[in-house]
Image (tube, rainbow, N blue to C red):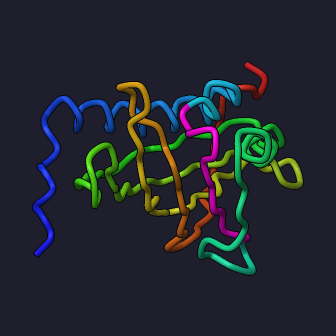
């Protein structure tokens, strides 16, 4: 019989919630250096390849590859990663945790001069590792559940 893993305490849950919120914030602010710093040095980001594949199929490992993948957001004038819910569980050993995070990722674009919001309704499946007392993302897989496009009247970056 394997020993029971201790439940996550409120401090750990708060730190993990802050970690996933910072990921969303840093993506929206295009702070790629801060975003990649949220990952362990050997961290893994597994991305979808829409519209061909909505599930996690493109693997990026380490800060350099993750930064290169996240810099693709520079092509989108405005994004908003709206976190909709999160659940954290203890991992198989101390210092490891897992999480599921729901998110609506808004991507503002102007195709043919008409602004629109490309929305990815997605879920992150995460594994976290505590290093030096700080929680980091060890692996994040992104699954898009559905994609929609919405009209936009006005957005930041458009003329006054």
Is 39 covered by the magenta stretch? yes
Furthest residue in direction top, as rendered: 160
The quarter holding residue 129 reads: top left
Task: Report the side of 48 relative to 113 (left or right).
Answer: left
Residue 50 picture location, percent across and down: 71, 71
Is 105 covered by the magenta stretch? no
Q: What main secondary structure does the magenta stretch of the protein show? A: strand
Residue 114 picture location, percent across and down: 79, 50
Furthest residue in direction right, as rendered: 112
Task: Report the side of 87 relative to 71 (left or right).
Answer: left
Quadrant of image for the C terminus: top right
Considering depth in this image, is 16 or 70 the residue closer to the camera? 16
Q: Which residues are magenta?
A: 38-49
Residue 72 picture location, percent across and down: 80, 46
Residue at (28%, 61%) from the top-left corner? Answer: 92
Residue 52 picture location, percent across and down: 75, 80
């Amino acid at each position: 019989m394997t020993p029971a893993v201790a439940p996550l305490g409120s401090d750990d849950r708060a730190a993990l919630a802050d970690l996933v919120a910072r990921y969303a914030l840093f993506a929206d602010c295009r702070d790629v250096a801060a975003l990649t710093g949220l990952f362990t040095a050997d961290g893994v980001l597994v991305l979808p390849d829409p519209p061909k594949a909505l599930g996690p199929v493109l693997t990026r490992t380490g800060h350099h590859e993750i930064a290169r993948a996240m810099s693709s957001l520079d092509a989108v004038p405005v994004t908003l990663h709206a976190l909709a819910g999160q659940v954290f569980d203890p991992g198989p050993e101390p210092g490891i945790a897992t999480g599921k995070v729901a998110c609506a990722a808004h991507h503002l674009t102007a195709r043919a001069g008409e602004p629109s919001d490309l929305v990815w309704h997605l879920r992150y499946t995460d594994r976290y590792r505590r290093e030096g007392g700080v929680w980091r993302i060890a692996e994040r897989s992104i699954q898009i559940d559905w994609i929609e496009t919405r009209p936009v009247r006005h957005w930041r970056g458009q003329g006054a």
